[in-house]
Image: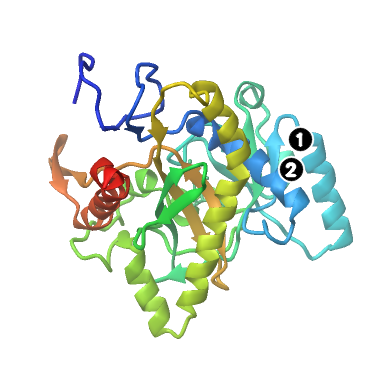
Amino acid sequence: QFPFGRRLPCDIYWHGVSFHDNDIFSGQVNKFPGMTEMVRKITLSRAVRTMQDLFPLEYDFYPRSWILPEELPLFVAEVRMMKDSDPSWKPTFIVKPDGGCQGDGIYLIKDPSDIRLTGSIQSRPAVVQEYICKPLLVDKLKFDIRLYVLLKSLEPLEIYIAKDGLSRFCTEPYQEPTLKNLHQVFMHLTNYSLNIHSGNFIHSDSVNTGSKRTFSSILCRLSSRGADVKKLWSDIISLVIKTIIALTPELKVYYQSDIPAGKPGPTCFQILGFDILLMKNLKPMLLEVNANPSMRIEHEQELSPGVFENVPSPVDEEVKVAVIRDTLRLVDPQKKKR
Ligand code: ADP
């Protein structure tokens, strides 16, 4: 750690948040320039949508989305048109403020007229998205998957996907959205940061119980129910590759402007957090990509009212230590030299 600046050049630079160091002329940096901007909700949505327009079947793993406020009239018109052509279609939508995280500011609506226009929408752009009403449930609960993906190089494109990830569970049994339950975040949103505040949250030392489990424990369970886990993995892998392909053109522009070809500079790699939701039919859907996935392997425990202590979290440790270890092995400068 260099809290007061660095003197000697390093083999590997591990930045906490983003690529912001103009003083690096060699070695490898763990962030790509522009990645944080590229995976913001609106930019990611735009990038994936460009590909959806070109290759609709290949990019059907991302819910139909509109950008607010600029596409509000389009959103209203398209929903009206779809409802007219299929009166049995009773959609739900999820509104997510741009740049938000941990479920911040997210709400569900049944109709475009329910968008909260008062004040915030102009100042806080958002993405509104078709809500996936039929997620796969385990123990009657909705959950999502956090997978760790190493983008090792942009040119040539080199992507590694960690074989295990985390499954983060809701803490109220799932029901399809109705006007009555739309606001129940513990039922509809899988964010750890929200569900931790529910009285039902279960910290478990085992990887296959509780409110945070390993993805491999879910796969085991699905496989014992006869699910085609190989097909699921192959769908997840193509979702990851196609998403990164959608981001690549603009990432290259950022890269060339920060590290122009021919000038001494570092190479980059980055661990990304992919948030994926499985539908009931096991189709994986992309929710979002995180440029700074949390690598914490501890969680807070309240010892007595108001007194907190950090205690190890075996599930996080099992998954995240392997991700960092394998990343360092893959980018090992000694290995490169050999
Ligand atoms: P944040 O960055 O605030 O976590 P997300 O896009 O990950 O925003 O959304 C938060 C949660 O909302 C997700 O973890 C998921 O449980 C739920 N969610 C998001 N988008 C959808 C969707 N289209 N359909 C169903 N659930 C969704």
Q: What residue does disc 1 label?
A: 72
Residue 112, which numbered label? 2
Q: Nearer the viewer, residue 88 or 272?
A: 272
Residue at horizontal 54 percent and vertical 71 percent from the top: 282
Q: Secondary structure at mark 2?
A: helix
Q: Position of residue 204 (x, y in %)?
A: 21, 60
Residue 88, percent across and down? Answer: 79, 66
Which quadrant of the rendered structure holds the N terminus? Answer: top left
Residue in the foreground of this view, choosing between 105 and 78: 78
Give the class, few, some or many, for how many residues have Cα within 10 Å of label 2's Cα (few <14, many ≥20). some
Label 1 CB-ligand 1 distance < 8 A: no
Which image quarter: residue 121?
top right
| Cβ atoms under marks 1 and 2 closer than 8 Å | yes
Q: Residue at x 42, y 77 (%)?
A: 222
Circle 1 SS class: helix
Q: Which mark is residue 257?
A: none
Q: Is residue 213 visible?
A: yes
Is residue 95 visible in the rendered structure shown here? no
Question: Is residue 252 rendered to the left or right of residue 28?
Answer: right
Residue at image location 53% in from the left, 40% down from the top? 106
The amino acid type, in three-letter code, at marker 1 is Leu
Which residue is at a point 23% across and 56% down the rendered structure image?
Answer: 203
